[in-house]
Image (cartoon, rainbow, N blue to C red):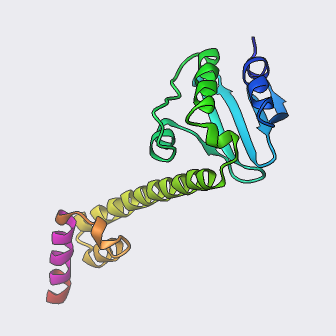
Amino acid sequence: MKFNELVSNKLSPFLNKHGFSITEEFKNYVKLVSAVVEVVVSYDERENSNSFYVGFINDNLTLIDNTIIKQVLNAQAELRITPSEMFLDDLINFLKSEGRCILEGNVQKLISIREFEKKRSETYTSMLLNKQIFFAANEAWQNENFREFISQIDKIDKNEVPPSYRLKYKIANQKLKQN
């Protein structure tokens, strides 16, 4: 059975009872909307994985993963990596219990989910940028380009600079003062 048919047969009747209806449907993608909440359930054939996204209507949707379930919703449930039918069973059980706030359109919880994901994304982006800066700083250090090394390290929050780079920073400043 195709993924969208599984969702229509298993998940949709449950969500219909909570005011949701299908607004978009493709082979591996189903969007359901209530008065406040939009959810998407999808299947990725390449990775053989299922996903569940949540958000306000016409807003960015957030992938609900086990970190969000535990840290934001304070729940013990898990969405396991399982075949689609079992994933949908897990999802329904989660939505019947600890995830009920999603079905009810709990504004505070939905905002908390969105803010958590925004913060997680910012942290990840910052980490990537810092890696690039450290790479450039290392290259400058190896080339004894101390001015560039200092310039690169100055781009990073001082609390995120490891002690070894702080020492190199100090040495680089001393080298520039000597010249």
- Report the magenta stretch's main SS: helix
For residue 77, above or below residue 127 = above
In front of the other: 138 or 179: 138
Residue visible at 78% across and 17% down in the picture: 9
Residue 84 versus residue 35: which sits nearer the camera? 35
The N terminus lies in quadrant:
top right
* Residue 149 percent across, percent down from the top left: 29, 72
- Residue 46 appearing in the image: no
Q: In which quarter of the image is residue 135?
A: bottom left
State which quadrant residue 97 falls in: top right
Determine if the magenta segment contains residue 171: yes
Q: In this view, does 173 lie above or below 76?
A: below
Side of 35 where 127 appears, left or right: left
The residue sitting at 73% across, 19% down in the picture is 10
Magenta range is: 164-174
As for residue 61 lying within the magenta part, the answer is: no
Counting the numbered discs, the total is: 0
Q: Quadrant of the C terminus?
A: bottom left
Between residues 149 and 119, which one lies in front from this camera angle?
A: 119
Q: Where is residue 83 in the image (x, y as percent from the top left)?
A: 59, 16
Left or right of 24? Residue 51 is left
Percent position of residue 156, x then y = 35, 70
Q: Is residue 121 visible?
A: yes
The answer to whether residue 17 is above or below residue 74 is above
Q: Position of residue 5 (x, y in %)?
A: 79, 18
User: Would you identify the image quadrant in which residue 129 lies?
Assistant: bottom left
Q: Residue at x 74, y 22 (%)?
A: 7
